[in-house]
């Protein structure tokens, strides 16, 4: 079977690429259904983009690489596409956009776009062998128990990273990159809960509060959740992408209120009230009990000096913790690292050394913040590659 373009992976990036690449395009995937990460994202409603999308909210060894694709296929372009297909959506916090209905509407939309462009989709299809010679990619596939050989002028690798292995994630993109001489930035779990020595926060499991979490100089103000194994919640997931094994993080348990000022004000009218009772006005009760094991919270407000109030405030707003690790690939929402962007053209996602070879989406060393940014990178990188292929 001779085709123009073979796309490996029917996820967000692969489907978007197919919608732009035009006739003669075949998308294959080993899964039973396309767009599985889309389907489960956002609690089944798909956080499909973010109004605040900008290059500064993406991590990469080369922070400039993502700029071209993001500028040429923006969040507004995807919003227009969603609206054109009659999919109702709403904004949650921090610019995050979700479907009013089910995430499967986004998958169906991409399939309609792909079919309209003349592309074809094969599911439950395994790649058994891949070679490249004389300007042609030859893929030996297994489909419905039968072997099929496909030859293509172009190959697009959209197989994602290693996150969420229960959904079939593998390191195939990295194997293909290595096969064709492309370097990797070491993949590691991103947007992942952080773990601590056993029992460290067991008494706080289930407690959550607004917090500012800082890792390597980057801070996030969102909810923090204590778990049996450590810390989670949006602020921790965000910070985890900037954290490296062995490093410390800093937690501000009261980012919106200065505890010292609050305690001094309370001291004037309720001096006989205990310090722990007053702290429960600004922090969860169980957290105050936990902190009492580590900080001096004895006495009444009347006994609290300004200096002690400042010291306590500093402890609450600059709590330094050293995670022992993360929950790893099992719960990571994305993969940090991937195919080194030095070997790719930022306008087309094409290899600089191997004609017709492209890498898009999560397979590439570009990772967004939590909140729809990684889908926007999938749309933008997929469109960049697809448009280039259609024009070629």
Image (cartoon, rainbow, N blue to C red):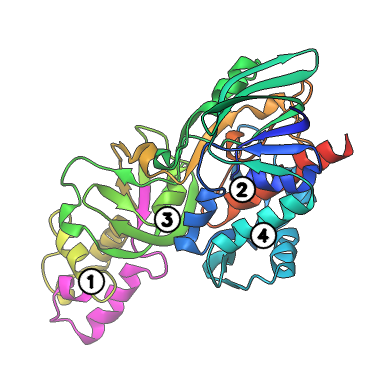
Q: Residue at x 72, y 50 (%)?
A: 114
Q: In this view, does 4 lie above or below 106?
A: above
Q: Which of 286 and 113 is in front in this view?
A: 113
Pick whichever of labels 4 and 3 is earlier in the sequence. 4
Q: What is the C-alpha distance between the residues marked 3 and 2?
A: 25 Å
Could you say which quadrant of the image residue 367 lies in?
A: top right
Query: From this viewpoint, which residue is outermost toward the bottom?
Result: 269
The x and y percentages for residue 161 are 52, 35
Q: Mark 1 points at which residue?
A: 279
Give the quarter of the figure containing the N terminus.
Answer: top right
| Dot 3 crowding, Cα within 10 Å, few <14, some 14–19, many 20+ | many
From the viewer's perspective, is the residue at label 1 or at label 2 nearer? 2
Q: Name the residue under label 2.
A: 12
From the viewer's perspective, is the residue at label 4 or at label 1 nearer? 4
The x and y percentages for residue 29 are 57, 38
Q: Which residue is drawn at 37% across and 32% down?
A: 245
Span highlighted in magenta in the image: 250-279
Pick whichever of labels 3 and 2 is earlier in the sequence. 2
Q: Nearer the viewer, residue 372 or 302?
A: 372
Residue 379 badge: none
The x and y percentages for residue 338 are 56, 30
- In the shown orientation, is residue 201 left or right of residue 99? left
Provide the secondary structure element on which disc 2 rests: helix
Pick whichever of labels 1 and 2 is earlier in the sequence. 2
Residue 262 magenta-highlighted: yes
Q: Name the residue under label 4.
A: 109
Q: Name the residue under label 3.
A: 235
| Dot 1 crowding, Cα within 10 Å, few <14, some 14–19, many 20+ | some
């Amino acid at each position: 079977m001779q085709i123009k373009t073979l796309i490996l992976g029917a996820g967000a990036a692969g489907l978007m690429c197919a919608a732009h690449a035009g006739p003669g395009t075949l998308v294959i995937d080993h899964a039973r259904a396309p767009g599985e990460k889309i389907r489960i994202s956002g609690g089944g409603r798909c956080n499909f983009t973010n109004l605040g999308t900008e290059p500064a909210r993406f991590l990469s060894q080369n922070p400039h690489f993502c700029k071209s694709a993001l500028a040429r296929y923006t969040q507004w372009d995807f919003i227009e596409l969603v609206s054109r297909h009659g999919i109702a959506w709403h904004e949650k916090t921090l610019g995050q956009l979700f479907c009013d209905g089910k995430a499967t509407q986004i998958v169906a939309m991409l399939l309609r776009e792909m079919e309209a462009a003349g592309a074809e989709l094969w599911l439950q299809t395994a790649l058994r062998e891949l070679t490249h010679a004389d300007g042609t990619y030859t893929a030996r596939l297994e489909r419905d128990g039968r072997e099929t050989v496909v030859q293509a002028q172009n190959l697009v690798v959209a197989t994602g990273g290693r996150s969420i292995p229960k959904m079939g994630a593998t390191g195939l993109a990295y194997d293909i990159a290595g096969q064709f001489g492309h370097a990797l930035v070491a993949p590691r779990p991103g947007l992942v809960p952080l773990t601590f020595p056993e029992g460290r926060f067991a008494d706080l499991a289930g407690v959550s509060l607004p917090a500012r979490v800082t890792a390597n100089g980057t801070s996030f103000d969102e909810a923090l959740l204590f778990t049996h194994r450590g810390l989670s919640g949006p602020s921790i997931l965000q910070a985890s992408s900037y954290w490296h094994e062995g490093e410390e993080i800093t937690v501000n348990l009261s980012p919106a209120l200065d505890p010292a000022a609050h305690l001094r004000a309370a001291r004037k009218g309720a001096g006989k009230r205990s310090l722990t009772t007053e702290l429960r006005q600004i922090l969860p009760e169980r957290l105050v009990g936990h902190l009492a094991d580590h900080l001096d919270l004895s006495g009444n407000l009347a006994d609290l000096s300004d200096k002690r109030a400042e010291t306590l405030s500093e402890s609450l707003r600059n709590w330094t913790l050293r995670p022992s690790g993360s929950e790893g690939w099992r719960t990571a929402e994305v993969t940090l690292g991937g195919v080194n962007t030095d070997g790719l053209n930022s306008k087309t996602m094409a290899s600089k050394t191997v004609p017709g070879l492209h890498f898009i989406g999560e397979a590439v060393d570009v990772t967004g913040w939590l909140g729809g940014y990684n889908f926007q990178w999938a749309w933008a990188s997929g469109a960049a590659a697809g448009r280039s292929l259609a024009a070629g």
